[in-house]
Image (spheres, coloured by chain):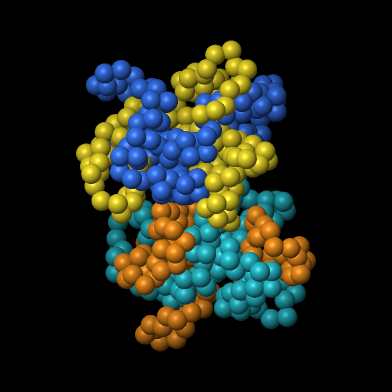
Chain colours: A cyan, B orange, C yellow, D blue
Amino acid sequence: MSERETEPADPTLESLRQRLTEFAAARGWEPFHTPKNLAAALTVEAGELLEVFQWLTPEQAGSVMSEPDSAHRVRDEVADVLAYLLQFCTAVGVDPLTALAAKIERNELRFPASGGGSGPGPGSGG
Amino acid sequence: MSERETEPADPTLESLRQRLTEFAAARGWEPFHTPKNLAAALTVEAGELLEVFQWLTPEQAGSVMSEPDSAHRVRDEVADVLAYLLQFCTAVGVDPLTALAAKIERNELRFPASGGGSGPGPGSGG
Amino acid sequence: MSERETEPADPTLESLRQRLTEFAAARGWEPFHTPKNLAAALTVEAGELLEVFQWLTPEQAGSVMSEPDSAHRVRDEVADVLAYLLQFCTAVGVDPLTALAAKIERNELRFPASGGGSGPGPGSGG
Amino acid sequence: MSERETEPADPTLESLRQRLTEFAAARGWEPFHTPKNLAAALTVEAGELLEVFQWLTPEQAGSVMSEPDSAHRVRDEVADVLAYLLQFCTAVGVDPLTALAAKIERNELRFPASGGGSGPGPGSGG
């Protein structure tokens, strides 16, 4: 986490979620922000992030942040994914931090730390 | 944001990001957690969230949280998407909150609030 | 299926698959065309097709082909999805038509035609 | 293309497209098969195909067809992707073979065969 910008104070996830809600309201975009549309938009943006990496070798992928254009693109797509995830959470009334904390606890039981090395399971969050 | 569980204190995004890093380290999963693999996993999980909604009418989609099974599934997929997004951010050294704050500021210039009602632009985060 | 162009003869799926193989070989692209990269590219392109529809109401989505720009975009993304699917099949040695015929037969047993109206099941191909 | 099964004759893409249309009609699934829903389902299934590969090294990904379980899963997801692509094409009235042939011709102009080795461009279908 090396980035710092001239924000007056570090934003929290909740403050950004509220800014996104106000942003959409000020533009009359709420009718578009159904759970289904936002889940689709989230998937589209995740695909755009993956697009940056699709033809890269593991070595090339590891240095994507040392090139300004691709670094900007990665930050931009991370922002889009997080924006749509937060707007989706607003639309369905889910607290993303609580959901993730609960999932980590389930995964700590499901994948004991001494467990074998066959790699992360599907949907493990690990 | 109506959910509350018996967490000792509200988790922050940064504390969950660190827990995920420790979780992966304790299981020897770091070699799998390349930027490319995590971007792929993020897209897969976003697709699983979309799967919940793919055949639903807007009305049905709006009531997905009132049915316990689909509500659990939605929370579970939100957690997976957020987990892989945070692990991706760790792998590339991006602060997701800073990235999103910067994107919102760019979008406030790009989409003035009085602007027309043709709906959210692609990648608008709006 | 209303489109007709000045092709000397209707192309077959197999002839297009071979043209794609030759196209990639002539440009030295085979090293990029691993199964994993092609599965990623396929997902990215499917997301780009979905992007055309993400904010549209069912009514708007139904008339997307009557507007030349969006009609071109849809045809272009359909082509990309099919191209990457065929190249993926080449990379792993799967015949897509045989795979689909086998799946339809399994689905005819799994979803009897008189069955209830709760909608297509996940991965039903239906 | 090494697979052969006991099909009476090799199916064509068009015959499978028609079988899928009849399959959906016999089950009353047409109302679900809007362009938007089918584009979403296509993306979801592409993600499921990618899931098979998400944690694999290039070497592991290359041998995924030599293990019966993963080989079956790959064939099954290929079938699902192709099924939804064909059903999408039916819903919007696009001929996928004509669309792909046109795209290959555009790409032959856009990416001359003697061109440099920076790899496949985005959406190149190449």
Q: Is residue D121 left or right of residue B67?
A: right
Q: Nearer the viewer, residue D2 or A93?
A: A93
Extreme-bottom residue of the structure: B8
Residue C113 appears in the figure: yes
The spot of residue B18 in percent (x, y) is 49, 71
In the rendered view, tell whether residue D53 sits above or below residue B31: above
Q: Is residue B23 left or right of residue D23?
A: right
**Image quadrant where one finds the C terminus of chain C:** top left
Which image quarter: residue C9? Answer: top right
Which image quarter: residue D98? Answer: top right
At x 35% / y 55%, what residue is drawn?
Answer: A121
The spot of residue D82 in percent (x, y) is 42, 35
Q: Is residue B80 left or right of residue C101?
A: right
The spot of residue C109 in percent (x, y) is 21, 39
Residue B39 appears in the figure: no
At x 35% / y 65%, what residue is drawn?
Answer: B70
The spot of residue D93 in percent (x, y) is 52, 34
In the rendered view, tell whether residue A67 sits above or below residue A111: above
At x 51% / y 78%, what residue is drawn?
Answer: B12
Q: Nearer the viewer, residue A74 or D14?
A: D14
At x 65% / y 60%, what residue is drawn?
Answer: B120
